[in-house]
Image: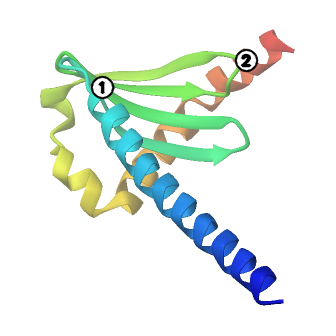
Amino acid sequence: MIVEALKVIAYIGFFIIVTILAFFFTKYMAKKSSSLNRGKNMKVIEALFLGNNTKVFIIEILGFIYVVYDNNSHLLLLDKYAKEDVNIENSHFGNDSKEVNNIIRKILKQKKNIVEKAHIKND
């Protein structure tokens, strides 16, 4: 009976050790992969998930801001702005994501016809 209790305690201890190691390994891999994916000339400023497999990205590439629609079957460029025209600092996005969401939704409303035509072509 004591031997069986020791086995259970050993299994629980082993499970805890493996869980802790998996946690730290996952954190290490996330940190390493995020540093590998950083580009010098491109960064995703904001991503808005609108539903299943539907996303809108605000991407900065070489001084231009692109608003891109993605539904996993195709990408669609909604709009392109010069960075100077947008006049929004990157730190602003992190502080007020509701305003960014409103901006994206306004752009989507303006481009609704383009998105609907793209869906019709793919169906």
Secondary structure under the numbered disc 2 in the rendered image: helix
Query: Which residue: 63% across, 46% down?
Result: 50
In space, the residues marked 1 and 2 are separated at their CA atoms by: 37 Å
Hey, which quadrant is residue 102 in on the image? bottom left
Residue 121: give x, y in percent of width and height: 79, 10
Label 1 vs 2, first from the N-terminus: 1
Label 1 crowd bin: few (<14), some (14–19), many (20+), radius 10 Å? few
The three-letter amino acid code for the residue at tag 2 is Lys
- Residue at 60% x, 65% y: name it: 14
* Image-based side of 84 in relation to 106, left or right: left
Q: Residue furthest right?
A: 123
Q: Nearer the viewer, residue 109 or 70?
A: 70
- Which residue corresponds to mark 2? 117
Quadrant location of the C terminus in the rendered image? top right
The N terminus - image quarter: bottom right
Question: As drawn, is 20 to the left or to the right of 53?
Answer: left
8 relative to 70, above or below: below
Tag 1: amino acid: Leu
Q: Is residue 77 above or below residue 23?
A: above
Say which element carries label 1.
helix
Colouring method of the image: rainbow
The residue pinned by badge 1 equals 36
